[in-house]
Image (spheres, rainbow, N blue to C red):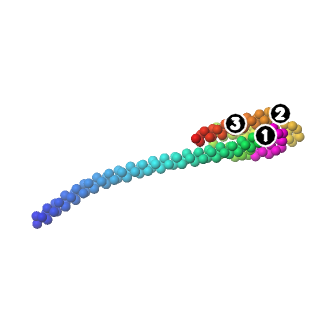
Amino acid sequence: MQTGGGFAAYVNGAANWFTFWGFWVTIVGFVVTIWQVMKTKSTAEAVRVAVEDVRQDVSREYLSGQLRDILDDLGEVHAMHVAKVPHLAAKRHVAAKSKLIRLAQDPELLAFEKADLQATIAHLTAIQRRVESAMLEGEEIGDPTRVLGNLSRQIDRLTGIQATMRNRSK
């Protein structure tokens, strides 16, 4: 019977030992699990921020491309005025201004970019009115160098906005 008592004491001692160390393994496991959850959360947040940055860069590049198309159209308008074909220039002018109006409504634009685009639209509208008025009256455009100069300034302004967009997306 002594053997059985010693064995029971041995099993009881081993059970106590396993219980003690099992408790600490559980505590350490719980701490490691919480740490991994926090690490995963911060990684997920970093990925979300990176995806948002890429989305904004793609959007800025798209806006820059749209602006490049408008600049090409206005370059053609300028060339048509130089070639003294205002009726063709007027049609291209209207198309470029319509694209610019759509672009100015994009929510990705910053406030100062929208303000610059609105100012450019206002100047282009004034140029358009002047040209259309002269065409309706069958007259020459008052001072073609003034129209060309105003148009060139608006092209320069849009080129500056485009450069700002490109710099911000890099």
| Place of residue 133 in the rendered image (x, y in percent of width and height, measured from the top left) | 84, 40
- First-in-chain label (2 vs 3): 2
Q: Mark 3 and mark 2 in contact (Cβ < 8 Å)?
A: no
Within-10-Å neighbours for mark 3: few <14, some 14–19, many 20+: some
Q: Rounded to the nearest whole Å, what is the CA distance between mark 2 and mark 3?
A: 22 Å
Residue displayed at 86% across by 41% down: 135
Locate the N terminus and report the quarter of the image it occupies.
Answer: bottom left
Mark 3 vs mark 1: in front? 1
Task: Work out whether residue 111 can be spotted.
Answer: no
Tag 1 or tag 3, which sits nearer the N-term?
1
Task: Quickly name the residue at label 2.
Answer: 143
- Closer to the eye: label 1 or 2: 1
Amino acid at dot 1:
Ala
Q: Main secondary structure of the magenta part?
A: helix
Q: Residues within 10 Å of mark 1 (few under 14, many from 20)?
A: some
- For this orientation, the residue located farthest to the right is 138
CA–CA distance between discs 3 and 1? 18 Å
Q: Is residue 19 above or below residue 67?
A: below
Quarter of the view holding residue 20 = bottom left
Residue 102 coordinates in the image, percent (x, y) = 69, 46
Q: Is residue 45 left or right of residue 17?
A: right
**What is the x, y in percent for residue 70?**
71, 43
Q: Is residue 136 left or right of residue 5?
A: right
Residue under label 3: 157
Q: Which residues are magenta?
A: 80-95
Specify which label sits upstream in the sequence, 1 or 2.
Answer: 1
- Element marked by disc 1: helix
Instruction: Give the number of the disc on residue 79.
Output: 1
Front position in the image: 117 or 89? 89
